[in-house]
Amino acid sequence: MSLLQLRDVRVRFRTLSSARAVLEGVADPFVDAVNRVSLEIRQGETFGLIGESGSGKTTLARSIIGLLQPQEGSVRYDGDELIGLSPRAWKKVRRNIGVMFQDPVGSLSPRMSVFSLLSEPFRIHNQVNLDLRSEVSRMLEMVGLSDDFAHRYPHQLSGGQARRVGVARALALKPKLIVADEPTAGLDVSVQGEILNLLNKLQKEFGLTILIITHNLNIVRHVTDRMGIMYFGRMVEQGPTKAIFENPAHPYTLALLSANPEPNPDARIDRIELQGEVPSLLNRPTGCEFHPRCPFSQEDCSTLAPSRQKFSADHDYSCHFPRNIPNL
Amino acid sequence: MNSKNILEIEDLNVEFSTPKGPLKALRNFNLTMSRGAIVGVVGESGCGKSTLINAIIGLLAPNASVTRGRMIFEGADLLRQSKQDLQKIRGQRISMVSQDPMTALNPILSIGDQMVDIQYRSDVSKSKKRDRSIEMLRMVGIPDPSMRFNDYPHQFSGGMRQRIAIAMALQVEPTLLIADEPTTALDATLEVQIIQRLKELQQNIGCSILFISHHLGVIAELCNYVVVMYGGEIVETGSVRDVFHRASHPYTQKLLECDPARIKEVTNTLPTIPGEVPDLVRLPTGCIFADRCQHTVQQCRDSEPELRYITPEHSARCPYSSHLVNR
């Protein structure tokens, strides 16, 4: 059963005011930050969304949690359409969606103690008849921090501790879905493991569904069930993590997987070299947006945008000349 | 001073004065960088990596002081330079890419202005400086560099800002480039591209690179020599091969074990290093890693271990290191 379902979500940002667009003769003064992305996250699974910076991962996450309004498409949470909801209705939905923002320390207000940070969700959602003190100590225990952390301020926390507070905050209202934007960026490898193990433990305990946004392939390989790869605002491939790591179909996925630096100085890595530069959003390539950098591109690629193709029942890709496909 | 060496750091000690007492952030630090070397420094946050960099470029916080040591850069002790002389070295012979691409650039100046500004020492015309900057932006992979030249930092993504910062640091053709976690914000394809670019540049103009990172994969790929730091001191140094294949300090071994990239079998319980980093105000007697080490014996808590040489190039601060290799 899918808990979250996105259909053809499109988020556009205006680059010129309408008057200037007319004056400068620009027909379309928008850029597509997220271009018709469809994805499905099933109850209880961990979904990894990867892609380079600027590929639209965070924009997509922000439209899931209602911080941005997509121009087109549909976002369904547990069967209910989220696009076009009133602010009051959003508040109800958000109780079920916990968010961990990028930057563990920066996402906590420096002027609030850990106690206020952790009790804020209850206050916002008017759950005042609770014993906040015991709730906060329950949450601290859940994420493995001792009670005296309640009196600390964010600057007195290490990155890993701040991240734990972020996890507790996201889980305060017992949500069903967690959206974690770069949950381990900037953390040391050992602390990174701690946070991921914690998320994994809490997932089992509470039956959480998790969407992890990251550009760390190693994390995706170990902790996610399914993954999606974004390039330039478009989902180029998605499917079970294991299947994608074994048989990447899209050339960008292939390049990404082969680029992953290995902590072994003698590793011989056969890299797929990407040609050229990252295109500009202002100047979106025609056809497939990956074709200027793609080592396998042919004539069709520059004119025809590829549609979504099935590799197997739940593994699909958008490419005219996919790799690793038998009998093609 | 050996003229083949570009930087020689001897017995460097840095302390911060805090209300609780002196915090010994860097202790007995030794490092020799030969010309053209790429040296990687690894360690967790709080291990003294940033203190080391700030000491080299003379940007330590006001409450910090160098209590002992020498830092010879191209024959001159950086600790005994006048402010003016240091000013000439920084940004010309030593340049730096900092950790945070968001704050490294001035938000109220266009990137073009900033790139032209930092060439103030050069005599060429302004249009030439502009061309050079655009060329540099193209080299680091900014699309439409001439069009984006007048854009402001907020108009670029995080990864692009970091590449702009790298372009600015390389533009002066320094003899020593200090890079503080420059690829943390980039995806794997760009990370690899930046590493390749750094390697090429290093070969073209022969600069040396001091590369700080906690990404072991990047260190393995880029560097020839590695320094592993823990709690303000060096625990192991050696060539990349020695350290990655024959890690001899328990901390290095743990660090390598924890890297999910090295774990071939898919697992959702990742290894961690239990325990906390030591309080550098109240240093433990004996080995700094004793509290978190699984091989600790009484002797580890009694006396501070010496740096032991496994080969002339490879050393570790653990008396049991030779038994621990190949575990």
Image: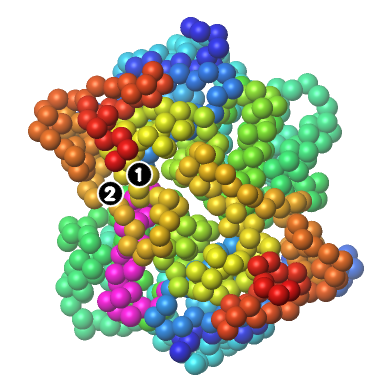
The amino acid type found where label 1 is placed reads: Leu
Which residue has dot 1 on it? B255
Left/right placement of residue A247 relative to residue A307 reads: left
Report which quarter residue A9 is drawn in: bottom right
Q: Please tell me which residue lies in front, B284 or A89.
A: B284
Residue B26 drawn in magenta: no
**CA separation, marks 1 and 2?**
8 Å
Tag 1 and tag 2, C-beta contact below 8 Å? yes
Mark 1 secondary-structure assignment: helix
Please give the name of the residue rendered at 65% of the width and 45% of the height, measured from the top-left corner: B193
Q: Earlier in the sequence, mark 1 or mark 2?
A: 1
- The magenta segment is A188-210
Residue B73: give x, y in percent of width and height. 51, 15
Chain to which mark 1 belongs: B
Q: Please tell me which residue lies in front, A177 or A12.
A: A177
Which residue has dot 2 on it? B273
Outermost residue toward the front in this view: A327
Please rate how many residues cluster around mark 2, counting C-alpha atoms within 10 Å: few if below 14, some from 14 to 19, many from 20: some
The amino acid type found where label 2 is placed reads: Ile
